[in-house]
Image (tube, grey):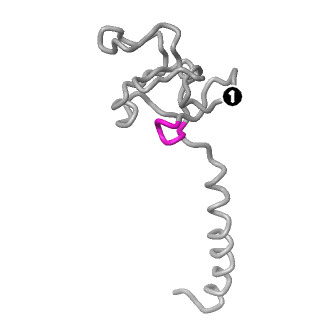
Amino acid sequence: MTTRRTFLKLVPATLGACALAPRLLADAPPAAVEESDPAAAAIGYKKDAANVDAAKYPQFKPGSTCAGCALYAGKPGEAAGPCMALANRPVSAKGWCMVWAKKP
């Protein structure tokens, strides 16, 4: 049975945990996009452009990777970065998808 004294001790701790939770969760990086993700599969995303089936994706051109795409917002030299086509979730810089557009 919970007494009033126990209840009054738990309330501040619970409120403190509730106040800190959003800060702790906000610092967690978003999960990298997997090829099996429904949104990624819909646009033919591949983590490595070397694995793209040119017969299935005739618009693919060798050398076109996420790092050279206008929708990729990663910094030069990074292994991964956010992609606007996939809600700014991280994709591999070596990847490719059907919405690839050359950076200006």
Observer-nearest of 3 and 70:
70
Q: Quadrant of residue 72?
A: top right
Residue 61, compared with residue 87, is above or below; it is above
Residue 33 % position (x, y)? 48, 33
Give the secondary structure at mark 1: loop
Residue 93 among those drawn in magenta: no
Residue 43 % position (x, y)? 37, 29
Residue depicted at 56% across the width and 27% down the height: 70
Residue depicted at 66% across the width and 87% down the height: 8
Residue 43, compared with residue 7, is above or below; it is above
Residue 15 % position (x, y)? 65, 76
Q: Residue furthest bottom?
A: 4
Residue 85 among those drawn in magenta: yes
Residue 60 horizontal side relative to residue 79, left or right? left
Q: Which residues are magenta?
A: 84-89
Q: Residue furthest left?
A: 56
Residue 17 horizontal side relative to residue 66, left or right? right
Residue 62 % position (x, y)? 48, 7
Q: How many marks?
A: 1
Residue depicted at 42% across the width and 25% down the height: 45
Amino acid, disc 1: Lys
Residue 66 horizontal side relative to residue 98, left or right? right
In which quadrant is the C terminus drawn? top right
Residue 42, compared with residue 20, is above or below; it is above
Observer-nearest of 48 and 67:
67
Dot 1 crowding, Cα within 10 Å, few <14, some 14–19, many 20+? few
Observer-nearest of 72 and 102:
102
Residue depicted at 35% across the width and 30% down the height: 41
Q: Residue furthest front?
A: 104
Residue tagged 1:
75
